[in-house]
Image (cartoon, rainbow, N blue to C red):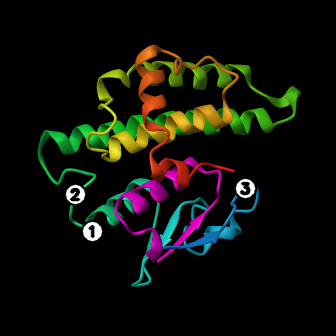
Amino acid sequence: MKLYHSPTSPYVRKVRVVAIEKGLADRIELVDAVPWPDPAAVAAVNPLGKVPALLTDDGVALYDSPVICEYLDVLVPAAPLIPRSGAGRWQVLRCQALCDGILDAAVGIVLERRRPPAERSQASLDRAAEAIRRSVGALGPELRPAGTAFDLGQISIAVALGYLEFRLADLELGVTRPVIRDWWAATRERPSLVATRPP
């Protein structure tokens, strides 16, 4: 399998964490494909010009991170990261969606900050930051104690918090609340997270 990736993409990091947790990392070749500013780097496997994109051993291109994560989870059926049915499945998928939304808003802030100051939209920055604060505030009930099952919901939370720390540490986004801070401190040294930290 080939994973088209950028080392700083949080969506790629989520896929890589899943691959490690499922024991698949050694079966995946990492292909550098930084789509910003040139989407042609990945357009052959993802017409959206975004990473991650996975080319399976059968030559099928999959994108983006939720689909790839589910594919890898099903590829190794033991110890599923996404429950196959029932309320637990929807809880995990909801948590992933919430965290992907946090990432979408965070990436939006990062990209907006790259614009020349005179072209930036403060209203867009404020709206995205507030969405992140609300969403981080909703994470408390989703957190599972460190050392318990590390499902895709928990992976998604870890990747979102890691990205906020990496790119937006200067903003007050709610990550210093004790329940969030303590969970992150207990989780951040998990081997799959250490191995995928952005450079």
Magenta stretch: give its range: 1-27
Identify the secondary structure beneath mark 3: loop
What residue is shown at x 65% (from left), y 51% (from top)?
A: 8
Indicate the amino acid at tag 1: Val
As measured in the structure, the alpha-carbon distance from the residue carrying label 2 to the one carrying label 3 is 35 Å
- Residue 45 lies in what quarter of the image? bottom right
Residue 111 location (% of width, % of height): 71, 39
What residue is shown at x 46% (from left), y 53% (from top)?
A: 192
- In the image, which is nearer the foreground, mark 2 or mark 3? 2
Indicate the amino acid at tag 3: Trp
- Residue 128 lies in what quarter of the image? top right
As measured in the structure, the alpha-carbon distance from the residue carrying label 2 to the one carrying label 1 is 8 Å
What residue is shown at x 76% (from left), y 56% (from top)?
A: 37
As measured in the structure, the alpha-carbon distance from the residue carrying label 1 to the one carrying label 3 is 32 Å
- The residue positioned farthest toward the left in the image shown: 86
Left or right of 118 in this view: 56: left
- Residue 17 lies in what quarter of the image? bottom left
Left or right of 100 in this view: 4: right
Residue 108 location (% of width, % of height): 64, 36
* The disc label shown at residue 128, or none: none
Q: Are marks 2 and 1 in contact (CB under 8 Å)?
A: yes
Question: Crowding near pointer 1: few (<14 within 10 Å), some, many (20+)?
Answer: some
Q: Which residue is mark 2?
A: 79
Residue 25 location (% of width, % of height): 45, 68
**Foreground residue, 77 or 66?**
77
Q: Are marks 1 and 3 in contact (CB under 8 Å)?
A: no
* The disc label shown at residue 36, or none: 3
